[in-house]
Amino acid sequence: MAAGGRSGPVFVSGPVFVSGPGRDYRRLVLRWLLALVVAGVLSAFALLLLTGRYFEEGPVLVRLTTTHGVHQGDLYVVSGWAVAVLCVLGLVLSAGRRSR
């Protein structure tokens, strides 16, 4: 029996702020998750560069020259690049924070 004569679970309403080892673990998991996303995007881009073509180029959206243009598939590449850059930014910013 706990002090004060009460026993059993304690319910807390509102946000719970975690400090100590739990906070560090979550930060570590987030860093690994972001790193895995970056590695996945870079691997997919390497595959695209090695094959020399997209799986789904799609129609030309903007013609730059008579033989080159921006395809619909390029939007996926730009989107993947943006996700990877945001993940790297998250890694850089989380590395600068200190645990309190």
Image: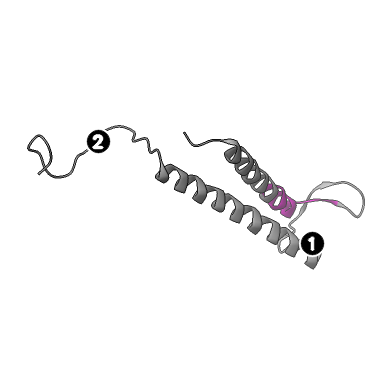
Task: Left or right? Give the position of 62 relative to 33.
Answer: right
How far across and how far down the image is residue 33, in percent? 55, 52
Q: Quick check: 85 above or below 4?
A: below
Q: Quadrant of the N terminus?
A: top left
> Residue placed at 46% from the left, 44% from the top?
24
Amino acid at circle 2: Val
Disc number lying in front (2 or 1):
2
Label of residue 74 in the image: none
Q: Residue at x 61, y 52 (%)?
A: 35
> Relative to 43, is 50 on the left or the right?
right
Residue 55's place in the image compared with 91, above or below, is: below
Q: Position of residue 57 (x, y in %)?
A: 75, 59
Task: Residue under label 2, please give it.
Answer: 12
Query: Predominant secondary structure in magenta?
Result: helix
Q: Position of residue 39 (x, y in %)?
A: 65, 57
Q: Amino acid at mark 1?
A: Leu
- Which SS class for mark 2? loop
The residue at the point 7 percent across, 37 percent down is 5
Magenta-highlighted residues = 69-79
Element carrying mark 1? helix
Mark 1 lies on residue: 49
